[in-house]
Image: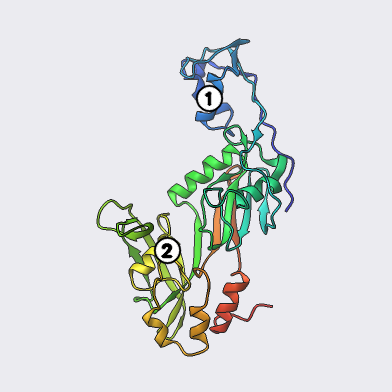
Amino acid sequence: MAPPDAPSYGSGPFRATEADGGERLDRFLASRLSEMSRSRLKALIEAGTVTCDGAVIRLPSAAVRPGAIYTVALPPAIPAAPQGQALDLTVLYEDSDLIVIDKPAGLVVHPAPGNPDGTLVNALIAHCGDSLAGIGGERRPGIVHRLDKDTSGVMVAAKTELALNALSAAFAARDLDREYLALCWGAPQPAEGEIEGPIGRDPRDRKRMAVVARGGKPALTHYRTLRRFGLGATLLACRLATGRTHQIRVHLASRGHPLVGDPVYLRRRPTAASQMQQPQRDFLLDFPRQALHAATLGFAHPRSGAKLRFEAAPPADLATLLSHLGAITPPT
């Protein structure tokens, strides 16, 4: 869906009422410019872009005077430090506040050492162009949540500060609908339940996460069985009550049911492989990435409050694997 014109943010004038008297200036402006965070407005005040009755005021905590007229000179968003790169994106929805995509496996979300470009952020900057209103004064998308490089599925990114703040709060509060498809080794018991255990750095390997006895963050994963393939493998639907790094992968591995193809948490041939017949066993053992897909994402629109829900079918590689197992119709 093509985005509408980028929103134009009003910057005043804002006349303070009697009820506004004594309010902090940054709070007063935040109530009038809901698209912007208070921290962003504080920085603008300190930069001298706010006036009171025509005089520059640089103190965010200054008391608002009833009847005074305040204006904010919003500077244009500067180009993002990451450069835009035209990459193929499957866009599920887009408007002036946000964009929802079906992320392919193999795509890194954010530039980082080892992946300086060719990331989702680079692709979004190129795709969205001038419809990125600017976040923190920079014309870039706001990454609300991440999927691992080799995890596929639905992701949302913010195009405005209002959307970034609202969506970040929704993810922090788990006030959304998010479900993953996970193909694991073995047959988790019970067929439906939860896995709880704090997650932190693995003390034996700092590049991995693990369920730890001390120093971890609380983590809870709900799961239910969608399809069992004997005792060898199981297709699960997983929902996160918390959002820790590698949470589904770590929790399932901690129960002896690592994800098929997981390069980090599956270090040896799983014993459950002996329960599978050929050629299905080889299909599972040869799958080159973790078999994890973000299938569903639902949330309230940050501006309108409308309920949105998006689904993404498993990508070709995972769909082909599931078809070999007889779980779905072979992809065309």
How packed is label 1: few (under 14 Cα within 10 Å), some, or many (20 or more)?
some
What residue appears at the point 35 percent right and 57 percent down from the top-left corner?
219
Judged from the image, the secondary structure of the residue bearing numbered disc 1 is: helix
Q: Quadrant of residue 231?
A: bottom left
How packed is label 2: few (under 14 Cα within 10 Å), some, or many (20 or more)?
many
Residue found at the very far front of the displayed protein: 114
What residue appears at the point 60 percent right and 42 percent down from the top-left corner?
303
Total marks drawn? 2
Q: Quadrant of residue 77?
A: top right
Under mark 1, the amino acid is Ala
> Is 64 in front, or is 6?
6
Q: Quadrant of residue 192?
A: bottom left
Q: Which residue is mark 1?
A: 43
Q: Which residue is mark 2?
A: 248
| 183 vs 109: above or below | below
Q: Quadrant of the C terminus?
A: bottom right
Along the horizontal axis of the image, is 286 left or right of 74?
Answer: left
> Is 175 in front, or is 195?
195
Under mark 2, the amino acid is Ile
Marked residue nearer the N-terminal end (1 or 2) = 1
